[in-house]
Image (cartoon, rainbow, N blue to C red):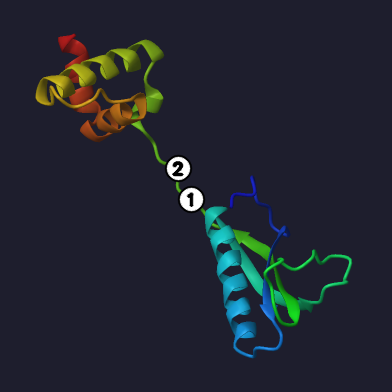
Amino acid sequence: MNIGMPTIGHAFEAALWFNADRTSERPDARRGVTAAIKRMADANGAVFGPIAWEILAPGDERVPEPPPHFSGRPRLMVGYAEIVALAVRPMQSRFTDDLEPRDLQRLRAATQEAYIRRNPKAPALDDDQLDAIVNEVGPGAAVRQLRMH
């Protein structure tokens, strides 16, 4: 789940229902909440601090009704973790980002033609696929292609 632009101090929160009558469900719920917070942090490039835990019961104003199929003594395992740092993501420079729109269209057309010649029965490539090929081939080959067309 992407939360948009994360900021230090923002908190991730996750919760799972468990049956308080079954001792094995409490640690499972805790592991599930931990995994959910980790997934949110990873998806948002964030590093979280310690998880604060709370176990809530139905009737608390913050607790929704348990799922209708739930049996036993329902409790909600809630974990909160504050963002303490943001992961540095290196910027990737792409050759296509530096091209003029006209040149980019010409390179896409030339790449599409070459692809179709080599793969006549394959469907045409979309712009993202063409751009990936242009970026992979590199500036030298792309400049040679521009001179040929």
**Above or below, 122 relative to 56:** above
Q: Quadrant of the C terminus?
A: top left
Q: From the top left corner, tell me how far across and down residue 123 is, in percent.
A: 23, 25
Q: Is residue 3 found left or right of 65 in the rendered image?
A: left
Pointers 1 and 2 in contact (C-beta within 8 Å): yes
Residue occupying the far left of the picture:
118
Q: Which residue is at a point 58% across and 72% down the rendered structure image?
A: 32
Circle 1: element type: loop
Q: Which mark is residue 141?
A: none
Q: From the top left corner, tell me how far across and down residue 22 is, in percent.
A: 65, 88
**Foreground residue among 11 and 142:** 11
**Foreground residue among 96 and 115:** 115
**Above or below, 126 relative to 75:** above
Q: From the top left corner, tell me how far across and down residue 147 is, in percent.
A: 18, 11
Q: Quadrant of residue 78?
A: bottom right
Q: Which residue is mark 1?
A: 89
Q: Which residue is mark 2?
A: 91
